[in-house]
Image: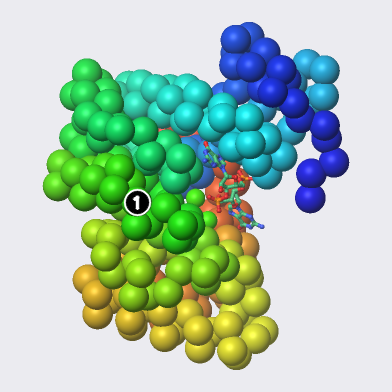
Amino acid sequence: MCNKKVTKKVITDGLINNHFSNNYQPIYSADNNLLNGVEVLLRFNSPSLGYISPDCFISCAEEENLINDLFFFSTNQALIDLKNNHKLKKISINISPSTLMIPDFYCWLHDKCKDNFISNDNVTLEITENVEYFETEVFLENINKLRMLGFGLSIDDFGTGYASLSKLKNIPFTELKIDRTFVKHAKKNNIDRKIIEHLVSLTHNLGLKVVAEGIEDVETYNMMKEIGVDLCQGYFFHRPVPINKLINNVIDG
Ligand code: C2E
Ligand code: CA
Ligand code: CA
């Protein structure tokens, strides 16, 4: 729930005055507990409104056509952080479908990675299952070219949207992230556990990796490993933190 009045001006002022920054949340391999990469999560501290959660500013940025500006800001910074800290290994970036509607967007990302000496396969784009875009020409061209260039493509928040598997099969996804609402309840709710088991086996049959996000305790972590998810993320391991904390507490800590 968003209780702050975020406007176009608040976001543009925030961008001009550098009040946005990236946080990073570690993602671990389930089989050996090693860091596999980090998810980039944008933060906004507005001098006038204080801390504003992404749920508030992302929806306003979408409505005011500023979401691409936020994407470029956040991605430029994340690529520099990855270039300077190879131990981060990989970055996963949240991308709105509207950014994938920019003609030749794939060239921009490819060139940016090249400029920063980053291999494309160390960058994954997390896309929510927003079917209305999935059949448009520009979107599909970007997606297919990105995949051909080696970028990872992840279906985010899987299970909360309306995408049917038959729609998803047209997109060359490499990974599926099970929404944290299923993960959260799996420990107590056998139906959620069964849904996750089913998703994992189906996703593996399609050759995709599975990420469980929102793991908050050891019981859930053990259950996810038992079910066979590939990658794990959540407050049980680490909350999202700025780059200096990530380096000190997670990478070198
Ligand atoms: P998301 O992509 O599902 O990101 C994961 C969210 O789960 C993050 O919330 C993270 O802080 C939270 N989280 C991680 N582990 C746990 C856990 O164990 N328990 C619980 N309860 N939550 C956990 P955050 O940072 O508030 O971001 C919310 C959403 O805003 C993100 O959801 C993503 O959809 C969007 N978002 C954030 N940054 C960006 C961005 O740069 N671009 C776009 N397009 N969307 C963004
Ligand atoms: Ca995400
Ligand atoms: Ca998610």
Residue at point 41%, 79% (across, down): 199
Q: Give amino acid for label 1.
A: Thr
- In the displayed structure image, the side of residue 117 where residue 73 appears, left or right: right
Residue closer to the observer: 71 or 181: 71
Question: Where in the figure is residue 166, as x and y percent of width and height?
Answer: 34, 75
- In the displayed structure image, the side of residue 100 where residue 114 appears, left or right: left
Residue at point 74%, 26% (across, down): 7
Q: Secondary structure at mark 1?
A: loop
Q: How many marks?
A: 1
Q: Is residue 225 above or below residue 194?
A: above
Question: Where in the figure is residue 23, as x and y percent of width and height?
Answer: 54, 34
Write down the quadrant of residue 29 in the picture: bottom left
Residue closer to the observer: 6 or 117: 6
* Ligand 1 under 8 Å from disc 1 Cβ: no
Question: Where in the figure is residue 236, as x and y percent of width and height?
Answer: 58, 58
Q: State the residue position of label 1.
A: 136
Around disc 1, counting alpha carbons within 10 Å, would you say few (fewer than 14), some (14 to 19), or many (20 or more)? few
- In the displayed structure image, the side of residue 136 where residue 185 appears, left or right: right
Whether residue 50 is visible: yes
Q: Is residue 228 above or below residue 110?
A: below
Question: Where in the figure is residue 248, as x and y percent of width and height?
Answer: 49, 30
Residue at the outermost left position: 148
Whether residue 19 is visible: no
Residue at point 35%, 69% (across, down): 167
Q: How is the image coloured?
A: rainbow
Write down the quadrant of residue 123 in the picture: top left
Write down the quadrant of residue 8 in the picture: top right
Residue at point 74%, 33% (across, down): 52
